[in-house]
């Protein structure tokens, strides 16, 4: 008798269902909340706004203009140059535009509309992973969160730090790789926010496991990612032979499986297919759990294998 699993067995094992997201807040409510989140960071006068913009433009000039970013800069190692990330509104019609435009507010708005986290983050500790020039940091802090950010690109981290200092946003920005896992952060955060990051890392399961470890029981992980529309548990691999520093673009089911294997319960994983085909997920850590399987884990014998 063959030792291979039956086709029926394969079919049952792949029929994993991850929850879709429902709508909680309407568009007008979301717009109101986002306006509240941005208001604290606008300058008191046009002169102040222009001064702040001048400081940023002088100290953090784009080495590639945002309009050409994806066409020209994407051929280079991301650590070797700097371009501003998210648009920032200093108030009074004064803006710094970036390669990501207003995507940070768009994605946070979608999180709010689907109830992935509340419109008031007061009293909650938030980790922003891959903060770039600080757009997410300001928005999440503006919602009331006590935000810590981590960014491995030194120039980008410095730009976020400078912007926060100029507008009066008090937050910690750590310059480090997320893979330099910090056990002192174990069970610390109510919300971990990683927008547009997981497809830029070479070990997405380890990435998800580290972030699972940093959450408190009951805490939430938000991931937004490039995706493939292919059926089943599938990943599109780009690597370095395509532009954009992209590694694995998962299908909806593949993303769900990464999250389940990182420790999140299947019924605590919601995955939304966004209008542009990308994925937005919200996963709740119910309790500390050990890895389902440690064979082949990229941190053998580490604390991350146990119940975190």
Image (cartoon, rainbow, N blue to C red):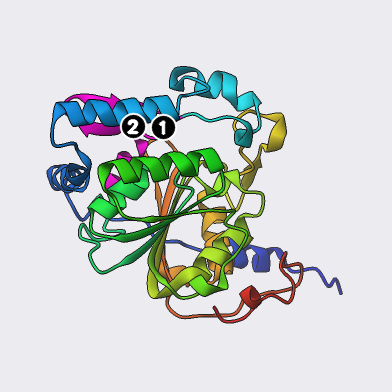
Which label sits in the foreground, 2 or 1? 2
The numbered mark, 2 or 1, whose residue comes first in the sequence reads 2
Look at 39% across and 41% down and name the residue there: 162
Check the picture and name the quadrant holding the N terminus: bottom right
Q: Residues within 10 Å of mark 1 (few under 14, many from 20)?
A: some
User: Which numbered tag is attached to residue 306?
Assistant: none
The answer to if 98 sits in the magenta stretch is yes
Location of residue 28 (image quadrant): top left
Q: Nearer the viewer, residue 72 or 18?
A: 72
Q: Residues within 10 Å of mark 2 (few under 14, many from 20)?
A: many
Residue 60's spot in the image, x, y percent? 45, 30
Look at 45% across and 61% down and name the residue there: 18
Check the picture and name the quadrant holding the C terminus: bottom right
Residue 180's spot in the image, x, y percent? 62, 61
Residues drawn in magenta: 84-110
Q: Judge left or right: residue 54 versus residue 209.
A: left
Location of residue 9 (image quadrant): bottom right
Residue 294's spot in the image, x, y percent? 71, 74
As helix, strand or loop, the secondary structure at mark 1 comes to: loop
Location of residue 3 (image quadrant): bottom right
Mark yes or no: residue 303 visible. Answer: yes
Distance (Cα) linking label 2 and label 1: 7 Å
Q: Nearer the viewer, residue 12 or 150?
A: 150
Residue hosting label 2: 87
Residue hosting label 1: 100
As helix, strand or loop, the secondary structure at mark 2 comes to: loop
> Does the CB distance between marks 2 and 1 fall below 8 Å?
yes
């Amino acid at each position: 008798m063959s030792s291979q699993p039956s086709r029926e067995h394969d079919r049952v094992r792949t029929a994993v269902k991850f929850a879709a997201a429902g709508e909680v807040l309407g568009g007008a409510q979301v717009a109101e909340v986002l306006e509240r989140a941005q208001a604290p960071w606008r300058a008191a006068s046009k002169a102040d706004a222009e001064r702040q913009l001048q400081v940023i433009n002088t100290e953090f000039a784009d080495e590639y203009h945002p309009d050409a970013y994806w066409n020209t800069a994407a051929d280079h190692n991301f650590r070797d140059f700097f371009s501003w990330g998210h648009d920032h509104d200093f108030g009074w019609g004064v803006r710094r535009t970036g390669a990501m435009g207003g995507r940070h507010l768009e994605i946070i708005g979608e999180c709010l509309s689907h109830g992935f986290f509340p419109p008031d983050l007061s009293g909650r500790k938030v980790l922003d992973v891959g903060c770039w020039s600080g757009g997410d940091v300001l928005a999440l802090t503006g919602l009331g969160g006590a935000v810590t950010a981590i960014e491995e690109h030194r120039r980008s981290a410095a730009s976020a730090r400078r912007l926060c200092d100029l507008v009066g946003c008090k937050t910690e920005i750590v310059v480090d790789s997320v893979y330099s896992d910090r056990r002192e952060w174990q069970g610390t955060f109510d919300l971990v926010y990683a927008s547009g990051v997981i497809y830029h890392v070479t070990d997405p399961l380890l990435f998800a496991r580290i972030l699972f470890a940093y959450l408190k029981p009951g805490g939430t992980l938000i991931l937004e990612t490039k995706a493939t529309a292919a059926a089943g548990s599938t990943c599109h691999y780009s690597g370095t032979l395509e532009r954009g520093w992209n590694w694995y673009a998962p299908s909806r089911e593949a993303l769900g499986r990464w999250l389940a294997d990182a420790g999140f319960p299947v019924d605590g994983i919601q995955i939304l297919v966004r209008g542009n085909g990308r994925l937005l997920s919200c996963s709740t850590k119910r309790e500390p759990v050990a890895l389902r399987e440690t064979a082949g884990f990229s941190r053998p014998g580490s604390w991350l294998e146990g119940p975190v």
